[in-house]
Every structure is written in structure tokens, then in C-alpha cells.
Amino acid sequence: MNMGTNPIHILYPVAAMMVLTCIVMALMLRERVAEMKERRIHPQKVASSSQMSATLQNTRAADNYKNLFEMPVFFHALCLAVLATGMVGPGMVAAAWAYVALRCVHSFIHLGYNKVMHRFFVFLASCVLLLLMWAAFVVQLAQRT
């Protein structure tokens, strides 16, 4: 652990990802309920994900919500591993905040104007950053043994 960094600082980006996920979930529920009321769709008509995608017209928030349970899971695991091993440093905390910022931009694009190539490049940047964070963690871990 870097002496200038409080270990709990790695948990703030994790909490921020949780906030982002909750915001997207609320938007998804609002969109879904509004569309189902407006189009008079019985809840049983969207009982499965295949029925839902075939029936609902606006699935961007639901799609983004699912995205937040894909690669970010590895982010959460990394942050907890960094905390558990006592290897929290300012670089890792800064990288964690950068990852959260990229995921926020990804969600903003996905839920907003939804330009696929813009979204893809932000997604790619977040994946590369996460890979580099994991690599740095593994190198630090290997140096300890």
C-alpha cells in the first residue's frame, strides 16, 4: 500500500459504479413501465428476454443495464482484490476513477444519441484500461511473492 493513499479510496469508484447502475436501472424501469402502459402490453407478454426484445420498441436502457453486469464485474473484483491485498495506490485509484468515467460516458452515449461507433470506442478504451489495471495488479502481486 502506498503510504499516501487511504485503502478505502478504492471503494469510492466501486460505489460510483453502483450509483451509475442504479440510475440506469431506474431509467430502464421508467421506460419499460411507460411503454407498457402506453401500448397496453400485458406483463405476461414480456415474460422472457426474447419476448421482451420482440415486443418492446425501446430497449436501450435495458441493454445498457445488462452491459453494466458484464465487464464492470471484473472491475469490481479487481478493486476488492486490490483492497484485500493492501495494494491500493494513487495510480490504481486514479485508474479506477478513469474506468468509472469511461463507463459513464458509455452509458450516456448508449442512453442518449446512441452512435454505435462512438459507444464502441469508449467501450474499447474502458476494456483496455481495465486490462492494464489487471496487468498492473498481477505484476505487483507477483513482485510480492
Image (cartoon, helix red, strand yellow):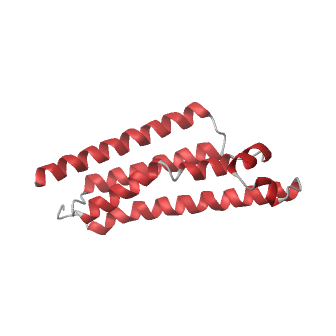
Quarter of the rendering occupied by the C terminus: bottom left
Residue 110 in which image quadrant: top right
The image position of residue 9, as x and y in percent, is 32, 65
Position above or below: 132 against 89: above
Looking at the image, is 138 positioned above or below residue 124? Answer: below
> Is residue 128 shown left or right of residue 34?
left
Residue 56 or residue 116, whichever sits in front: 56
> Residue 44: horizontal and vertical position, in percent?
80, 58
Q: Residue at x 40, y 58 (%)?
A: 76
Judged left or right of residue 91, residue 72 is right
* The image quarter in which residue 4 lies: bottom left
Q: Residue at x 40, y 49 (%)?
A: 98
**Residue 38 place in picture, x, y as percent:** 87, 55
Q: Position of residue 132 (x, y in %)?
A: 31, 42
Residue displayed at 60% across by 33% down: 116
Count the numbered circles shown: 0
Q: Which quarter shows the N terminus?
A: bottom left
- Residue 142 is left or right of residue 16, and the answer is left
Residue visible at 15% across and 49% down? 142
User: In this view of the protein, which residue sits in the foreground, 114 or 139?
Assistant: 139
